[in-house]
Image (cartoon, rainbow, N blue to C red):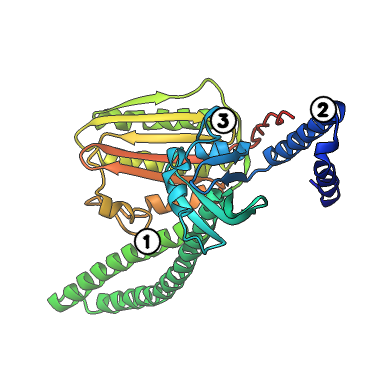
């Protein structure tokens, strides 16, 4: 409401006693229109707006606030805020001398999210001793998640850059040592078949074998962390998963693993590198099979919503303890007796290159679930109904 319109209305209200019934009716309709306009404007905001009485009762809540509180719109007005959100009510319980504040708060209901709260006290125009609290709520969950992901991505990138430099520096002397071992073997050949010459040749051969193994580790590591730009194309994820499961079925049968695959008849396309997606699926499935060395069940499920294609690989294997779960994406960290420890790192790299994410949840002696999320090529935009005037 503009200052001009407000002052005009104030002048009319100042002459309220002199108005006849007809003018009172006109004034009532005008006030109703003003109120409807204000509510319509506030209901179009993405931020939640609350007006609280001194005792914490909700005097007003716009549409966004009702959603953020997880409340029934018909039960909000007049109810105590603690009934809907004890977390927010506790955060707003400030000493009387505090005129305002801004802070972020994690809430658990109606769903886990991060809210930014801005509080301001407003004096009652008709009572100097009475104040109201106006609260503006903003859902910053996505913003917080993006910030944390960016920080984590930068941390991993810096570690990988350092590790790649170290691996490269290790590779150079390995090549030099390998060349000199070849020269040493040639010189040993000139010594004939004496016991000393045979020992030299055997030792040189062992050293060359170990150098070859180390060189393979370095190459695998560099291949895992060096960026390989995906060759993006329209990809039918249903077909990719079906093809991968067909290729792995014989191996599963040999291991005594029963597999259940739940695929939709069709789903929207994703923009992806088919080979990299298949590599991520192979790595996740390989980990699941290795966790079930004595047989078990593997559940592969594919679904989609308005924005994401979600691929889930769940096993009934040994599971991963909570203290180890945070390290599964570290290079060369493995919970198995054998393995290079690069499988999950490669999955993480592929998913980030595709604008997706990977999530792993595990319970010891129950099993592990790896969830891959790919953004759909064309995300469906959901529209909200316009607020009623």
Picture residue at 45% right of the left edge, 57% below the top: 224
**Marks 1 and 2, the one that precedes in the sequence:** 2
250 w.r.t. 4: above or below: above
| Labelled disc at residue 25 | 2
Farthest residue to the top: give it.
265
Residue placed under numbered mark 1 in the picture: 216
Toward which corner of the image does residue 99 lie, by quadrant?
Answer: bottom right
Q: Quadrant of the C terminus?
A: top right
Real-space Cα separation, disc 1 to disc 3, in angstroms = 64 Å
Is the residue marked by circle 2 packed among few (<14), some (14-19), or many (20+) residues within 10 Å? few
Q: Is residue 281 visible?
A: no
Where does residue 75 sit, x and y in percent of width and height?
52, 30
Q: To which residue does mark 3 refer? A: 73
Q: Which is in the foreground here, disc 1 or disc 2?
A: 2
Q: Earlier in the sequence, mark 2 or mark 3?
A: 2
Q: Quadrant of residue 41?
A: top right
Element marked by disc 2:
helix
Q: Residue at x 51, y 44 (%)?
A: 276
SS under mark 1: helix
- Give the Cα separation between the discs numbered 1 and 2: 88 Å
């Amino acid at each position: 409401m503009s200052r001009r319109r407000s002052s005009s209305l104030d002048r009319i209200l100042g002459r309220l006693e002199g108005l006849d019934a007809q003018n009172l009716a006109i004034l009532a309709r005008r006030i109703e229109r003003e109120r409807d306009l204000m509510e319509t404007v506030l209901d179009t905001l993405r931020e939640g707006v609350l007006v609280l009485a001194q005792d914490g009762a909700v005097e007003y809540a716009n549409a966004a606030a009702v959603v953020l509180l997880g409340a029934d719109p018909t039960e909000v007005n007049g109810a105590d805020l603690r009934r809907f959100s004890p977390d927010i009510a506790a955060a707003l319980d400030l000493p009387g001398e505090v005129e305002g504040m801004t802070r972020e708060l994690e809430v658990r209901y109606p769903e886990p999210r991060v809210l930014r709260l801005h509080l301001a006290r407003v004096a009652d125009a008709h009572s100097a001793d009475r104040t109201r609290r106006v609260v503006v709520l903003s859902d910053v969950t996505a913003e917080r998640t993006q910030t944390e992901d960016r920080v984590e991505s930068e941390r991993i990138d810096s570690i990988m850059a350092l590790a790649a430099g170290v691996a490269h520096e290790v590779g150079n002397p390995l090549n030099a040592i390998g060349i000199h071992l070849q020269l040493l073997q040639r010189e040993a050949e000139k010594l004939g078949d004496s016991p000393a010459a045979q020992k030299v040749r055997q030792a040189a051969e062992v050293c060359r074998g170990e150098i070859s193994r180390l060189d393979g580790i370095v190459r695998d590591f560099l291949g895992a962390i060096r960026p390989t730009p995906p060759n993006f194309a329209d990809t039918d994820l249903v077909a990719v998963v079906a093809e991968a499961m067909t290729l792995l079925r014989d191996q599963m049968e040999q291991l005594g693993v029963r597999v259940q695959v739940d695929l939709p008849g069709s789903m929207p396309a994703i923009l992806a590198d088919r080979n990299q997606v298949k590599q991520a699926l192979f790595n996740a499935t390989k980990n699941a099979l290795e966790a079930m060395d004595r047989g078990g069940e593997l559940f592969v499920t594919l679904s989609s919503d308005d924005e994401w294609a979600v691929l889930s690989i769940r096993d009934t294997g040994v599971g991963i303890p909570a203290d180890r779960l945070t390290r599964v994406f570290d290079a060369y960290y493995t919970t198995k007796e054998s393995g290079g420890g690069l499988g999950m790192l490669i999955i993480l790299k592929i998913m980030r290159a595709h604008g997706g994410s990977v999530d792993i949840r595990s319970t010891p002696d129950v099993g592990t679930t790896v969830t891959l999320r790919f953004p759909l090529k064309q995300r469906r935009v959901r529209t909200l109904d316009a607020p009623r005037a």
